[in-house]
Amino acid sequence: MGALSEKLNEEKVFKDPVHRYVHVRDKIIWDLIGTKEFQRLRRIKQLGTTFLTFHGAEHSRFNHSLGVYEIVRRIVDDVFDGRPEWDESDRLLTLCAALLHDLGHGPFSHAFEKVFNLDHEEFTRAIILGNTEVNKILSKAGSDFPRNVAEVIAKTSDKKQVISLISSQIDADRMDYLQRDAYFTGVSYGFFDMERILRVMRPREDQVVFKHSGMHAIEDYIMSRYQMYWQVYFHPVSRGAEVILTKILHRAKDLHSQGYAFKNEPLHFYSIFEGNVALEDYIKLDESIILYYFQIWQEEEDSILSDLCRRFVNRNLFKFVEFDPAREYKKLGELTGLFRKAGIDPDYYLVVDSSSDLPYDFYRPGEEEERLPINLLMKNGDLRELSRESAIVEAISGKRRTDHKLYFPGDFLLDESSKKNIKKQIRSILDY
C-alpha cells in the first residue's frame, strides 16, 4: 500500500483551459504523467483530421487524459468521499484508469486502426502490462495493480462502479471531451452544466446514479453530445479529410505489398504493413512521423500516392454529395465504370463514407453494444431509468441517426483536357 498512499511534498497543478486547474497530489499519478508512453500522447491529436475544418482543434490526447483524470479526482475526492457506498480503497485504481484510458491510441486514431486492423484498447492493455515505464510505476503499488487498472479500462473488472465513472453513457471521458472539443473548435454545442451533474452524482452499489433534481442538467448533457456529433465529429469536411488520409495509408500498404521501390523507405511502417506490430514499434509512432512521410511521399513516382499526399498536406480535399447506398447502389456502379473510363481509379477517388450515432439508449439485454442506462435516484430511494422521467430523452432514446456521403475529386472532373465527354457524364450523374 506504500506506493498507493505516497503523496508529493507539494501539490502540482497544470493550468487547463476547461477545468482551470488539474491538481496532482499523488506521487504515482505524477510519475505516470512523466513516462515516455504518456508523454507520447502530446503528439497525437484528440480530434484527428478535424483541425482541417476547425483550425483551433490542435489539442492532444494528453490534454484530454489529464482532463478525465481531473474530473474523476473531483468526483472521488469531493463528491464520493465519506459516502458508505464508495470504497475508498478504489481511489487510486480509479484515478490511474482515468489517466491512462487512452494510452494506446495511435496517430490519427480511428482511421489508422481501420486501415491496419489495429485496436487501441489492446495497445492500452499492452502498454500497461508490458515492459514499459508505465508498468514499472504501476507495479510499485502491487504486482496485481497493473492488471487491475487494465481490467477497469477494458471493462472486464468486477468493479462496475469504477468502470461507470470512466466508461458509461455519462462518464468523465465524455464530460471532458465534449467541453474540451467545443472549446478548441470554437463551437458552443458541447458546453453543459458539469458542476451541477457532479453535485447530484451518487455512488450506488455497482453503478453511479444521479439525483432526480439534476435531471435537467443531464438532459442538457445528452443534447450537447448529440449536437457535437453532428456538428463537429461527423462534419463532412473532416470526414472527407479522413477519407484521403485512409486512402493514403491504403495506397502505401498496397504499394509495399506489390514490391514498389519507395524513394524514401517507410521504415516506421514495415511491421505495420506486415501485420506484425511490436509494442516498441507502435509506441514510436505518432502524428509527426505520419506527417513526415506524407510530406516526402508528395515526391513519389506513384501518381496516386503523391496526389493524395499533396491533397492532405495542402488541404485540397474531395468534394461530396449526399448519397443513399440502399437506393442508389446502381448509380455507384455506373459511376465506378465511368471513373475507370476517365482514367480515375475509383478505389481511391470514389468513396462512400457513413456516420452513425445513437445518442442515448436504455438497457436492451442481448443486443449488440449493450448500454447500461442512466438511472435517476428518486426521493424515496428508488431508481428510475432516465427516459421514463424525461420527455426530451424519451424522444431520442434508441433512435440511431445515419448519414452517408459520396466523396470524389472535383478538380479531376472539371479538368476537360482529357476524357471530356465522360467527365461531363460523371458530373451530370453527381449533379456537380
Image (tube, helix red, strand yellow):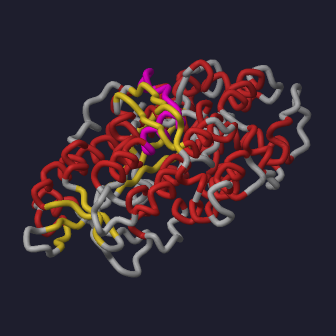
Point out residue 227 in the picture as x, y percentages from the top left corner: 27, 42
Which quadrant of the view contains residue 269? top right
Residue shown at 42% from the left, 56% from the top: 166
Segment colored magenta: 53-69
Is residue 59 part of the magenta span, yes or no? yes
Say whether residue 345 is left or right of residue 219.
Answer: right
Is residue 87 part of the magenta span, yes or no? no
Point out residue 353 in the picture as x, y percentages from the top left corner: 49, 47
Say whether residue 94 is left or right of residue 106.
Answer: left
Point out residue 26 in the picture as x, y percentages from the top left corner: 51, 43
Point out residue 429 in the picture as x, y percentages from the top left corner: 45, 40
Please state the total of marks drawn on the protein image: 0
Q: In this view, which residue lies farthest toward the bottom? A: 366
Residue shown at 55% from the left, 47% from the top: 6
**Which of 106/215 is in front?**
215
Indicate the quadrant containing the C terminus: top left, top right, bottom left or bottom right: top left
**Which of 302/132 is in front?**
132
